[in-house]
Amino acid sequence: MKKILLICLILISGSSFAQVDVTFKVDMRGYNIPFTAAYVNGTFNGWCGLCNPMTDANNDSIWELTIPLPAGSIEYKFTVDGWVGQENLTPGSPCTITSSGFTNRSLIFSAATVLPVNCWGKCGACGPLGPQKLQIKLPISWQDSLTTNLSTTDFGGTYSTLAPNPTNPAWLSLKITKTNAAELWAGTTLGTSAGFPTNIPFSTNSNQMQVLVYAPNAGTVFKLKAENKADPTQSVETDVTNTTANAWEVLNFNFANHSPGTSAINYSFPYNKLSLFPNFGVTGATAGEKIYYIADVAFGTLTNTKELNNGNSVSISPNPNSGVFEVSNIQNEKATIEVSDLLGRVVLSKSSTVSNNKVDISGVENGIYLVKIIAGGKTSVNRIVVNK
């Protein structure tokens, strides 16, 4: 009897640690920047970067990897060349989970699993040609991840991802976490090694850029660096110290005032790559882990900061949806509801009342849309995801 009990205990114990094969597949046609290899990173490998490289044996742009993992649940995402580039997944997409502001792919499994091919940065297949995303360019607002490649490049101990705006979750911003292991020079390149498609138009009379930031502490030094993507020795840096904690603030970077000990701006250089260094000069070990949000980035002056705050308490449900949703908490008997795509094209405009607030745009394509509600002299802009 004791032997039987012992055998049962061994079998139960062994089954709790049993591993099953999980096969990951990603279609890299949705990533338009040159790279060496795709990787899968997740909770199962500590987000280690280079631990689990994928392969494309038949050169069809479908990268694959099979890993033995303990049955259960994991979060993961696909990256390129370790953490040189990473997916920026849309919160609310059906294959994702958002926790503590980070949006990753999610999987629950109890047996050997072969995942379907997912398009880079998307839930589901790319289609015959795959999405041809535009290269990131100025001005940057972080809203259009469906048509623009918003991948970022972290270095020195930062981690960045698209996340809901801390004061208006209807809008996305870039969340940069400077970890407690970060170097004093840790930061994030706003894009990939490909930089911007055109040069930043610096001139003797036009040297400034503005960045909308949200920081946990006042007195934080932000460094902004512009460089030539083909020659990093051609660069210019400038610093600004913020004055506001836990609130949005427009920082004005004047590149005519370069950082001490760095090169002055040279107007003959093609500056076409931009990196931001939050809390520059302070290590993560000294400051502890800090989180910063970046909304808009522009050459010259920011012209649109409407995503900072909701105009009222209007809410939309469900979201994501199939194109049919209801607007609630309209505080005025008469209101106007306007729905537009991210290119500003209006797809619906209607009058609404407290008792008539259903919206149907089920005929539109899947994607992100902006819902503007004008009521009682206040305007609210909300972001929805249509996924049919």
Image (cartoon, rainbow, N blue to C red):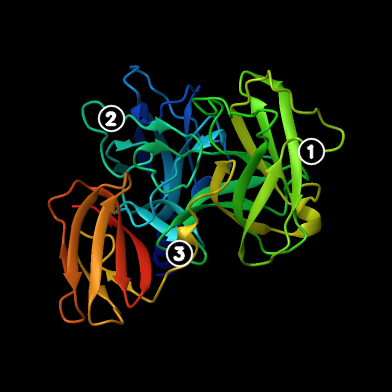
* Circle 1 residues within 10 Å: few <14, some 14–19, many ≥20: some
CA distance separating discs 2 and 3:
55 Å
In the displayed structure, 148 sits above or below 376; it is above
Say which element carries label 3.
Answer: helix
Mark 1: which amino acid? Asn
Q: Nearer the viewer, residue 331 or 135?
A: 331
| Among the two numbered marks 2 and 3 on one chain, the one whose residue lies closer to the N terminus | 3
Residue 41 spot, x, y in % from top left: 50, 42
Q: Which residue is mark 1?
A: 257
In the rendered structure, the answer to whether residue 316 lies left or right of residue 250 reads left
In the displayed structure, 49 sits above or below 16; it is above
Q: Nearer the viewer, residue 386 or 263?
A: 263
Q: Which residue is mark 3?
A: 6
Q: Nearer the viewer, residue 239 or 13?
A: 239
| Among the two numbered marks 1 and 2 on one chain, the one whose residue lies closer to the N terminus | 2
Mark 2: which amino acid? Gly
CA distance separating discs 1 and 2:
44 Å
Find residue 153 and report its image quarter.
Answer: top right
* Circle 3 residues within 10 Å: few <14, some 14–19, many ≥20: few
CA distance separating discs 1 and 3:
75 Å
Q: Which residue is mark 2?
A: 130
